[in-house]
Image: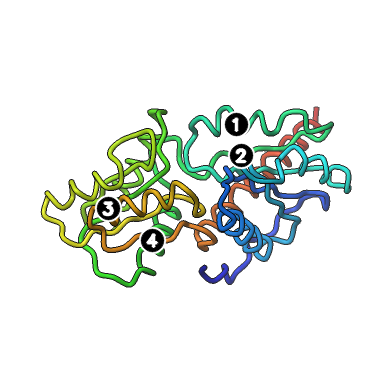
Amino acid sequence: MTNLIETPHPQVAESAGTAMLLLAHGSLDPQSQESTRTLARAVRLSRACRVEVAYLRYARPRARHVVRTLAETGHDRVIVVPLLLTSAFHARVDLPRALSDTSALVPIVTPVLGSSQGVPDGRLVAALRRRLVELNVAFDAVVVVAAGSSDRGAYASVTAMASALGADLGLPCLAGFASTASPTPGEAVAQLRLAGASRIVVASYCFAPGLLFRRAADSSTAAGAVGVSEPLGDAPELVELVLERFHEACDVQAGTRVSTEQQ
């Protein structure tokens, strides 16, 4: 894992009872859960507030339980930052379901970390590039690998990220999908090889390791990729993006309170 952000995010005025909940997809892989907890620790060190973790599937605790516990321990505001890279099924269906019936405390949910407008956040591009540099191998093309979705917006978001990373690196870059969509990571590697690339690496566009991560790595390596980057994990750029979502939610809530009080 990488070093933490050296300079904490500027503090904002807020109630002492505010907590942050990082809501991840979840995996049966213990390494995935540890990666999420490591990210939470990095965020906590850069931000003086309580930071908890919950999962949508496969792992515990679940968001509903964490929000209730936070309310019972005196927190009057919970800001949920979804660790999701697209606004697909998990964001539209699983997320609202996970936060339903959370007692009288209604959590504030930020947008997902990936862009739903087709314009990737530069910090995610930088985080992907950071992980590729850590491979310490020479390469002449890249495949950005994501989990995959039948949602057109999610597909477009990943392909836009591939275009942005390729432009940033000045190299050919294609999107590959570990499930549901095409091309697969192996097929994307093969396409780049046919186009003349000889040293292709994979940029893992995911937060934590798991079944799909290993499937994508195996597919890519079998097709001739010379390296597969680690997931985003606790990359400083990701920590910064999480903090920005948190502060934006705090600012919106503060503005809403002021507006209500003035009426």
Nearer to me, 26 or 122: 26
Under circle 1, the secondary element is: helix
In the picture, measured across the screen, residue 147 lies left or right of residue 175, that is right
Q: Rounded to the nearest whole Å, what is the CA distance between mark 4 and mark 3?
A: 15 Å
Residue 177, above or below 44 = above
**What secondary structure is marked by label 3?**
helix
The residue that label 3 is drawn on is: 166
Badge 3 amino acid: Gly
Residue annotated with mark 4: 229
Where in the figure is residue 241, as x and y percent of width and height?
54, 53
Q: Is residue 197 above or below residue 25?
A: below
Count of labels in the image: 4
For the residue marked with disc 1, what is the amino acid? Asp
The image shows residue 208 at horizontal and vertical percentages of: 51, 54
**Rendered residue at 39%/69% (across/down):** 134
Callout 4 environment at 10 Å: few (<14), some (14 to 19), or many (20+)? Answer: many
The tag earlier along the polypeptide, 1 or 4, is 1
Mark 3 vs mark 2: in front: 2
Question: What's the distance in space between the residues labelled 3 and 1, CA to CA?
Answer: 32 Å
Quadrant in which the C terminus appears: top right
Residue type, label 2: Arg
- The residue indicated by pointer 2 is 57
